[in-house]
Amino acid sequence: MTEESLSSAIRNRINMKDGIVHVDAGGLHYKDLNTILRTLGNPVPIVHIENVYGQRYIGTDLSNNMEIHICGTPGNDVAAFLDGSTIIVHGNAQDGVGNTMNRGRVIVHGRAGDIVGHSMRGGEVYIREDVGYRCGIHMKEFEGKKPLIVVGGTGQDYLGEYMAGGTLIVLGLKMGSKPIHHARFLGTGMHGGVIYLRGEAVHTSKEVQIKPLDESDYKILRRDVEAFCKEFEIQPEPIMECEFTKLIPASKRPYGNLYVY
Amino acid sequence: MKSFLESEFTVVRDEERCIRCKVCVNQCAYETHCYDAEDDRILSKDENCVNCHRCVIFCPTHAIRIEQNVTGYTQNSNWSREAIVALKKQAEYGGILITGMGCDKPNFTYWDRLLLDASQVTNPSIDPLREPMEIKTFLGSKPDRIELEEVDDDVVLQTKLSPQLVCEAPILFSALSYGAVSFNVHTALAKAATEFGTYMNTGEGGLDERLYKYGDHIIVQVASGRFGVHPGYLDVGAAVEIKIGQGAKPGIGGHLPGEKVTEDISRTRMIPVGTDALSPAPQHDIYSIEDLRQLIYALKEATDYTKPISVKIAAVHNSAAIASGMVRAGADIIAIDGVRGATGSAPKVIRDNVGIPIELALASVDQRLRDEGIRNHASVIVAGGIKSSADVIKAIALGADAVYVGTAALVAMGCTLCQKCHTGKCPWGIATSDPWLTKRLNPDIATRRLTNLLRAWSLEIKEMMGGMGINAVESLRGNRMRLRGVGLTDTELKILGVKMAGD
């Protein structure tokens, strides 16, 4: 599909200025918005989508390497099935950020709703503030693919539920130098991957164990926290001064002994 | 603890026929037979036998017979042998009883109490051997009306049609996930679907890249575990199916044990070798019809509106209302799996007690969608215990567009319904990922067996249609006047929407 194939009404929404493609999304249906995003892409552009008012699925299945800035509030499932591009949300995101994402980066300058990174298998998600329930649910890793979620704030219950791989870091930056994360049932059904909490958890599920961090953990943490800080222009050193809690699965087979054959 | 369980089967060997060739020893995956070199004879451990018939079929001298253990418990109509064995097992192991295949209880089948009509005197029957019979089936959303325009003496369709699946017969292969079944089984299903002109369904374990070339005849499934779901997988299929539930285990998730996650399966599911593949009970982004709509449209966006999106549910008490919601949520196809639907592994208590027969669910779903004027917005595929072409044609007369067959396809490939799929030791090389066992199923021969089955059923369907004086399957769909019931109560007849035979 080429830009010429778009209808004139949609084409009028696109404006090129200083090498940046501006798209006016005000009142535009998500289907048309995604059609625009799919037609752009060669050469790889920087896209600013302005006046976003809750359109769902922005950037779904986007496999080219664009840098997309969303100005406003995107709807659910932003970056679902994402497979390459970088999506930067200048505002809050809703539910399902990076749902079943495979590759790429999502950066949210604000908070995000429930199920951030649901079943994501690759790529990185950085949320500056808090996240809702079930963040990182069923994220998994495979070979070279190891997903990462870094949350600047804290999360709600069932953080890391069914987690099967990847890294989930929760920093609690607005909770002082010794954050207490109040989410309950952390890591329910967790059978892979690792969760690092800056500070402490009050309620973990029976499927996880708390372990002390060793030097290799700090190496991972420092790298990922620095990447987070770079996105939001925060100093990483004070963050790393605090004690972290590491949660890993108590068993790779949490439900192995429930059955009789 | 001393086990109080007895062997379920007795291996009877005709010593005069047995030539000590040890085929049975090698064929049994459960180590039932062993060769005693000292006495030059083959011994059998009855307690290991699952009655899969592998040794019976492959014994060159037909020396083996398997019998039900004749040592029964004292006759008791309330406490069956099955109930006693279950109690003893649970007392010894303290866990959920797991089984394979579909519900084996009697009395849940309505197909056998429905009879088909035929033409006599007042309207002619059609001979399908001489006249064309149309059983090609299109699956997907149909428009409320079509607009045509005359251009230069030609009629041109103006209405934009939704994407459709095209089946040469109203029969598709049901979802059988890679991991639960072997690669050779997936290959045979994909090849047979391609050769015949229908579809196989990947199930929730992803699709091996070696089978991508059959993508035009594959429905790719997206379930709660999202295993192997990535943009390439969504792109390669002819349709995408969201799995909410399955008939064998409505309301619960799946659990592929780590030992079945071999290298190949790990690559397809995209999880490390040896880890458990846990599918949560719900899809955690779907808690309502509105949420379902959200995933349907996420998948439509991901596939650029080029493929039908199917949603599969288990048949439960309020299926009709749920189906209405599914159609309104934008599903192009709704698949309903009845209580007799099979599985690679499920808690026995759930398999045998949860869900409703597909015949009743189908009748009420079809009626509900008709009453609401939205029946054309989605095609209906039914599954769960379709065991013959007669069941297919009765399903269509009750209102289905097509059927999914799982168990029937497995039986065609060699399955004997021993119900031990969950052990991963299928001696027929079907429900296993053990490389030694999977080699037993030759994909080319299995493909032939499957295409033969589809051909045979198609011929029978045409014969039955011809007998009714119907030459296009479309004319039979939802045509309940061509069905009559026997041995059914008034309430059953009312729900099925059919008259009593003789009426």
Image (tube, rainbow, N blue to C red):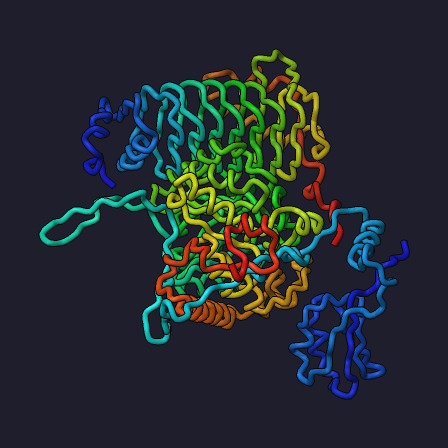
Quarter of the N terminus of chain A within the rendering: top left
Q: Is residue B248 left or right of residue B88?
A: left
In the displayed orientation, state which residue is furthest to the right.
B2
Q: Quadrant of residue B128?
A: bottom left
For image coordinates 39% across by 71% down, the residue present is B121
Q: What residue is at 36 percent from the left and 24 percent from the top?
A: A69
Can you give x and y, in whole percent of width and height, for residue A125 in the image? 48, 29
Front-most of residues B477 and A1 = B477
Which percent across, then down, holds residue B496? 53, 51
Q: Is residue A115 above or below residue B80?
A: above
**Residue B115 higher or lower than B289, as above or below:** below
Compare residues B319 and A97 and report the one nearer the observer.
B319
Q: Quadrant of residue B167?
A: bottom left
**Residue B465 picture quarter:** bottom left
Q: Is residue A25 left or right of residue B15?
A: left
Q: Nearer the viewer, residue B289 or B179?
A: B289
The x, y position of residue A36, in whole percent, is 28, 33
Residue farthest top in this picture:
A176
The image quadrant where one finds the C terminus of chain A is bottom right
